[in-house]
Image: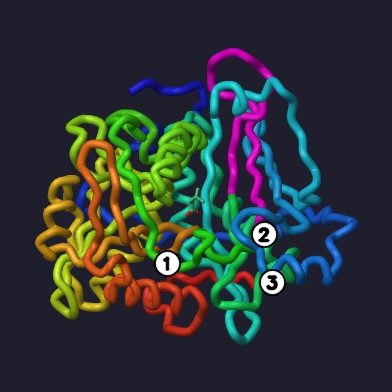
Amino acid sequence: MTTFVHSDLDVSAAKVVASGQALYPTQARASAAAAIALHPNASPMSGADRTKILENPGFGQYFSDNVVRATWNKAQGWTAGELISSATSSGGFGMNALHYGQSIFEGLKAYRHEDGSIYTFRPEANALRFQRSATRLALPPVPTDLFIGAIETLVRQDQAWVPNDPDKSLYLRPLEFGSENALGVRPSLEVTYVLMACPVGAYFPKGVKPVSVWLSDDYVRAAPGGTGEAKCAGNYAASLVAQAEATENGCDQVVWIDATERKYIEEMGGMNMFFVYGSGDSARLVTPRLTGTLLPGVTRDSVLTLARDLGYQVEEGTISVEQWRAGCASGEITETFACGTAAVITPVGRVDSKNSGAWTIADGGSGEVTMKLRAALVEIQTGRAPDTHNWLHRLV
Ligand code: COI
């Protein structure tokens, strides 16, 4: 593998985690919050306007008053960061990210608990994935303390934007991009990290209802050696035409099939997938193994743990389109669900495709195991169940 110009770039960090190794090991939790300079928005939104937005925030349509920004250059490394108005924007048309796509992001949420305190969920896991994505895209990794310190600083400043409703949260969007104005095709020598926040409700407009999915027979999301396991902007740009095809065919989401054999299920647009065999206490869950072409979801990792806690058998393996179709027809596969930070856990009810026909999933997707896992996850995130895995990180 090529080494890049950044001397601090550890290319081995970008490689797939060997099987059996914990994907997101617990790390020491540092904080850089104290070092971040505060220059907050001098004209924050009025309480009345904000309250109106929080009643029905949708997903990613409104931004809180501030962002945290830090910059990097080769000589000085990362700055300590500053909190500034979210209306501030900088950078020219020559920015590397705009031309060559050196751009990565993350997604996590801040949840208000019943007593008014605010927590986020497994931020060190997102920090680690962000660092892996950075390495793959030849960007300098954002240190964990800056990543988490920015979250602490922004949520403390904009805490009024965290909805007081267990079905809503403040979505946190860390973004890192090559911000040098230069058209040479090489890693950017100036890089910007921005953390922004949006109040959100359900990701899918119809709420936690089963979604329909379209198998992408013509387009490929990721091939071995590509950027499939990095959370980079280009993966999402390349997915949009397939998502449009899904919509044209009356489906909510696209499902990706592996690039090599064109038969194994990989993931949904921006979410990982689980297949449930059997029912009740003897249910068995299968999720596609992380081969390097799938996004290693933090929610996926949490679901694997929670499913074991609930006594289900769990397997990271392979599942082909044909096994999915035949399993639903025979009743062996009882449920299918998607999971991700934005979508949480969402049941899949119907599949359609060009080459493999159409089918429904058991009862159309109102799965018992799916909903049990969703409740287990959301109750921990919102402080209504004990945090036995030490996943919560207090912000306020
Ligand atoms: C997330 O679940 O946070 C995602 O990144 C999915 C999508 C909103 C891009």
The residue under label 2 is 33
Q: Where's the N terminus, which quadrant?
A: top left
Name the secondary structure under disc 3: helix
Left or right? Give the position of 321 relative to 12: left
- The CA span between labels 1 and 3 is 20 Å
Image-quadrant location for residue 49: bottom right
Q: Answer with left or right where residue 20 lies relative to residue 295.
A: left
Query: Among all residues in the image, which is located at the extreme top?
Result: 184
Q: Is residue 93 left or right of residue 317?
A: right
Q: Is 346 placed above or below 179 here?
A: below
Task: Estimate how packed mark 2 is, as few (under 14), some (14 to 19) or many (20 or more) residues with alpha carbons within 10 Å.
Answer: many
Q: CA distance from mark 2 to mark 1?
A: 39 Å
When the figure is inspected, residue 360 is found, relative to residue 137, above or below; the finding is below
Which mark identifies residue 209?
Answer: 1
Camera-side mark, 1 or 3? 1
Q: Which residue is mark 3?
A: 55
Helix, strand or loop for disc 2: helix
Amino acid at pointer 2: Ala
For disc 3, the neighbor class at 10 Å (few under 14, some 14 to 19, many from 20) is some
Span colored in magenta: 174-198
Q: Is residue 172 left or right of residue 360?
A: right
